[in-house]
Amino acid sequence: MGRMLHESLPSPSRHPVKALDQRAMQLTAGDQELKAALFRFVDVTPACRSLDDLARHLVGFLSEVDERPAPLEAAIRMSSTRPGRRALGAAAAAGVRHMAHRFIVGESPEAAIGELERLWRSGVGASVDLLGEATVSRSEADRYAERCLDALEVLSAASARWPEQAMLERDSAGPLARANLSVKVTALTPLMRAQAPERGRDDAAERMRPLLRRARDLGAHLHIDSESLDSLETTTEVAFELLAEDEFADGPSAGVVLQAYLRESPEQLERVLDWVRATARRLPLTVRLVKGAYWDHELVEARQQGWESPVFERKADSDLNFEQLTRRVLDARPDVRVAIASHNLRSVAHAIAYNRVQGGDDRDLELQVLRGLGDDLQQALASRGLRVRAYCPVGDLVAGMAYLVRRLLENTANDSFLNEQARGAPLEELLAPPA
Amino acid sequence: MRAFANEPVLELRRAPVRDSLTGALRELDSRLPLRAPVLIGSSEGPDTGVESRDPGAPDRVVAVAGAATLGHVEEAVSAATRGAREWGARSADDRAQVLVAAAERIRARRLELAALQVRECGKPWAEADGDVCEAIDFLEYYARGAVELDRGPALLQVPGERNTMHYAPRRVVAVISPWNFPLAIPMGMVAAALATGNAVVLKPAEQAPGSALALVEALRGAGVPPDVLGLLPGYGEAGEALVRHPGVHVIAFTGSGEVGLSIVRAAAETPEGQGHVKRVVAEMGGKNAVIVDSDADLDEAVPAIISSAFDYAGQKCSAASRVLVHEAVAGALLERIAGAVEVLAVGQAESFATDVPPVIEREAQERVNGYAATGAREGRVVARVERVPAEGFFCAPTVLAGLAPSSSVVTEEIFGPVLAVERVASVEAALDALEASRFALTAGLFSRSPATVAEVSRRAPAGNLYVNRGITGAMVGRQPFGGNRRSGIGAKAGGPDYLLQFVEPRVVTENTMRHGLVVD
């Protein structure tokens, strides 16, 4: 299965821009100092007030790198004059903007519609994620909820005009929503407190309920994202409590996320399945299985506090757990719908193959990728007639930066699959069982 | 001994961990009030006269303690003078073993001791648990440090002479401790003194005798002889008599600047019969500012500022009480801080949902409210939490802006949940403001420019500067803690130099030449 998918991947030489980005990612992955400098620069870009300011920050970070490639030396020399800094700042801003556009489909839902329709026509669904600043106040939580309502409206109205796409519209359990929005519970409340999950739960629920009603009335899908472990209990309780309410028994279509890097994820999945079987909800809950995007954060926090790490420290252990959870969650159908979200060819191939071996229908397995990182894979999957959905961040560049840096950190880790693949690791290695 | 590592704090995000603490609190409640007598040598003194009460429910008496008299001070110093001889003669290794055993005793009671702080000091669980862990850290850290110090530094040697340097105990140490870190701060001072071979007389804050008793129980239970550690619960007079006693060699104090400076003055006296000059280790107040530059990540700055200013109702000497923000982001920052303060939950320390607990006592409540009123008169109130429980010593978390640099609200230590935000034209101007303050304990900086970080590190006078994080929560061995200027005498608790305050250096030079023959 993995070989078949690999054959369907586009050749990198046909995409000069993509190849360039791949080289940039390879370059930074190989040099931890340079990686740190560039990420810190990307991170601060939105807060810089002028091109001069931008250039000063860039040079500040680069000056901390011990061994600088020639182009970076040239950049530092350029920064010694004011016109030089302006030119350097402009070039750097353009570079960051270019990178950001690779990951962010549009600055608003309206602006994203064109790209989302193009994806749809090429056989790829989308789940929209609204980027924004951290929520620390009620007004910020209200604003995020407003943006979510607006996105549901815009996505539903626009997608109604799209042409029929059989693979994306129906599975054995029934019709699938065209409009699909992912929401973050921590953005819906300023009261997220790890040691008092009920505060965040009760407050977020008040803002989540109108979203569920709107999604239900519009026939859209609402997916409740998972973030760091500190918010997992809050997120889980919001989902369980609201989706069990009578008014949502027939809709909307909804989902939760399971993070395979968490050591406790097998128990978390059992908890989800127990809940699914205990509620009167008629629509199956969608479970999106991911590796998890907060690995560095969880590990560093645990090391600083002297706690046992809540995440697997070896990538192979995460990968192995991912495959075990894949089988467990696929076996749990039709109580749940399944989305397998990974860029790892082996993990994806494993899910497809297991589904087929068990006599499952391809329609009953959704595969998900991240916009900007899984573009090639999504094309390969769609060309094989499989159902694929891209997770598409929407928002302005300022808001997108934190998100971007997190994605870049994750995917330029030395042992990340994409990095291995870009480095040209042999296919047998890429498809080998995790060990 | 294995290498030092900080005691891990409890993982409060886990429900079973929270349940275990709630259980410990119920168990403690069933035993209240605790009894904390005056302890001198093997004898127990009076056990009435001082009461500690729950600041969130003042009807609840947490501990009843003895009130030490001047006579007790006399007896306690005599006992300590006797005890110091035998204790000081023991090897550093032996003493270190006793301290490590005491750490184990604290560890075994950690849930109960955290619960005691929740009740006795209105300290929320996360901070109470952190305090117990820090007490353990001090025992483990100074035990190892004293063994290391005992080896003595290397000196230059030439043929025919042998030069050695060693550190001898100063003998009797008076420890005068505050209520806000009721176990960790006294434990730090006591453990440093004991590890280096001194005897200790501890005079804890009258608001927290229960925690002080637990400290003495752990150390005595682990093998510290009764004469070597005395406990004098009580009021200021006992502390003052202790400070003035000619038998005391070192005074280790943490508390207000006013008391600290009076100790420095009193310790300078050398009455007839006192054959030494007293050494003072004083850790005093702060007026700690966080600088926010225009390139700061406000998503990180806002939660860090809120937590630094309002956790434990601002009753940490390291707490943030000023923000100096670059004018380019001042509007955005102020709006977000105001919004984040409006949702703070003011409530009982025992509730895991509480953000801001009560302050320690009525006098503190009145003082804090006074500053808030002054700030409202002289500037403007940006945010204020109006929903505050009526019973208990609660204060409304308040954010003020538009105050003149000379306002008492921005120059004096408030020690409560009041934060003043000031707009500055540049980081330079913020540094000038720090320069103008007589305090220099902690400071914070939010900036993503390496050049700015370097410049502020160079210029900020604070004893502890925190960059792109909160400014409280110093960890033993990681952030040696202590202030400069009028905030402290410069000793760093939990750092490599601290023990030197409790010893006197001695150098021995021996002639190893006998009639032309070198015999060493």
Image: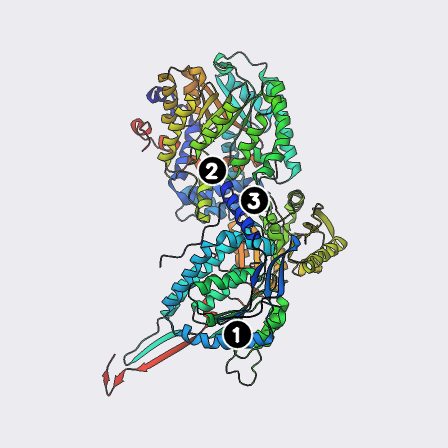
Q: Chain of mark 1?
A: B
Q: Is residue B463 above or below residue A227?
A: below
Q: CA distance from mark 3 to mark 1?
A: 50 Å
The total number of labels drawn is 3
Residue holding disc 3: B300
- The kind of residue on which mark 3 rests is Glu
Which of the two labelled residues, at mark 3 and mark 1, occupies the earlier sequence position? 1
Q: Position of residue A38 (x, y in %)?
A: 46, 41
Q: Which mark is residue A294?
A: 2
- Residue B426 vertical placement versus A26 (above, below): below
Q: Is disc 3 placed on a helix, strand or loop? A: helix
Pick the residue in front: B230 or B261.
B230
Are the residues flagged by discs 3 and 1 in contact, CB closer than 8 Å?
no
Q: Secondary structure at mark 2?
A: loop
Q: Which mark is residue B76?
A: 1
Left or right: residue A255 compared with residue A425? right
Quadrant location of residue A47? top right
Image quarter of the N terminus of chain B: bottom left
Q: Amino acid at mark 2?
A: Tyr
Q: Secondary structure at mark 1?
A: helix
Foreground of the two, B125 or A204: B125
Location of the C terminus of chain B by quadrant is bottom left
Q: Residue at x 42, y 16 (%)?
A: A383
